[in-house]
Amino acid sequence: MVGRILIIGACGQIGTELTLKLREIHGNDEVVASDIREGAKELMQSGPFEILNATDESRIKEVIEKHEIKEVYLMAAMLSATAEKAPMKAWDLNMDSLFHILNLGKEGKIEKIFWPSSIAVFGPTTPKDNTPQTTIMEPTTVYGISKQTGERWCEYFHRKFGVDVRSIRYPGIISYKTLPGGGTTDYAIEIFHEALKNSEYTSFLASDAALPMMYMDDAIKATIDIMEAPAENIKIRSSYNLGAISFTPEILAREIGKHIDNFKISYKPDFRQSIAESWPSSIDDSAAREDWGWKYEFDLEKMTKTMLKGVEDTLKENANK
Ligand SMILES: NC(=O)c1ccc[n+]([C@@H]2O[C@H](COP(=O)([O-])OP(=O)(O)OC[C@H]3O[C@@H](n4cnc5c(N)ncnc54)[C@H](O)[C@@H]3O)[C@@H](O)[C@H]2O)c1
């Protein structure tokens, strides 16, 4: 850590758990959470919180000065499925917020930046299996276009102005603490809730839609590891491929079926299926492994057991409220 930390978009699926982990590591007062809305009680009560719109440059500056922020994690964005419904809004949020933060880095007001990219930077012409770090990238979604453009700008600001910006291409992130925010891989979370509530699930992706996925704890570990690595180890300043597990709805359903006897899955693919078809099935993350020691811990079996336990506990807690 180079100074106090600001998380923008802290109330989202990843931001919530990232904030709590960073507070655990660095101390509650060192990590300021912010979002356009309030979030989970645990997040709101464990440390400083600011209402902040990521597209409002002067408000970002104000919060950064007030809390003497030196490190920013920019997690606010409009995700793949939601962005297809509001393309220009998605473009404005995803790009404006990034420019505001990169410019603060250029002006020397902050010293280190984390900005997440996504497997959505790839497209139908990209090699699908074990997708290389450097390859054809022709994204077809507005979300993917914004992430690919963002990657180019991150690299540019690093090369031209020495901005210390670090990024990873998250695969679909699976977790139970905070609900997902409108991505194409959300089925892999919904399925656990429905399996435990109703013993059945209708997937909005086809049975054989293989996608790269990762359990939340691994995603948080990767995020913190890349930020803590010495600057000279971060050789890629666009964004690193990051892999863990890869499965289809059918494979995941079979794994869940090992724990829930009568679990049934059916398939009713919608517009998200064509987004899934344009993305890789699995990812080559050897550059992240070599440069900053990336290694995942949660395989399909461990992730499934952890999710079933976590969702079950959450459902019980909610029922008792
Ligand atoms: N979750 C995934 O599977 C996944 C995969 C690849 C990449 N990512 C990337 O990781 C980042 C975080 O994703 P997430 O899943 O936590 O998303 P999310 O949708 O769950 O959370 C985003 C948060 O940003 C906030 N936000 C929206 N507009 C804002 C604004 N104008 N100002 C401030 N806050 C605003 C929302 O209120 C929300 O709390 C995003 O950049 C996303 O593209 C996520």
Image: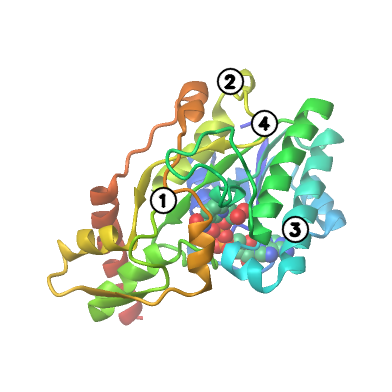
**Distance from label 3 to label 1 (Cα)?**
27 Å
Q: Is mark 4 within 8 Å of ligand 1?
A: no
| Position of the N terminus by quadrant | top right
**Distance from label 2 to label 3 (Cα)?**
29 Å
Q: Is residue 65 above or below residue 185?
A: above
> What residue did someone put label 1 on?
213
Amino acid bearing label 1: Met
Amino acid bearing label 2: Asn
Lower position in the chain sequence, tag 3 or tag 1? 3
Q: Secondary structure at mark 2?
A: helix
Q: Which residue, as the protein is rendered here, is positioned at the far top?
A: 232
**Distance from label 1 to label 4 (Cα)?**
23 Å
**Image x and y of residue 89, in percent:** 75, 68
Q: Are marks 3 and 1 in contact (CB under 8 Å)?
A: no
Q: Nearer the viewer, residue 206 or 196?
A: 206
Amino acid bearing label 4: Arg
Q: Are marks 1 and 4 in contact (CB under 8 Å)?
A: no
**Left or right of residue 142, residue 253 in this image:** left
**Distance from label 4 to label 3 (Cα)?**
22 Å
**Image x and y of residue 58, in percent:** 87, 55
Q: Residues within 10 Å of mark 4 (few under 14, many from 20)?
A: many
Lower position in the chain sequence, tag 2 or tag 1? 1
> What residue did someone put label 2 on?
233
- The residue sitting at 75% across, 58% down in the picture is 54
- The residue sitting at 56% across, 29% down in the picture is 228
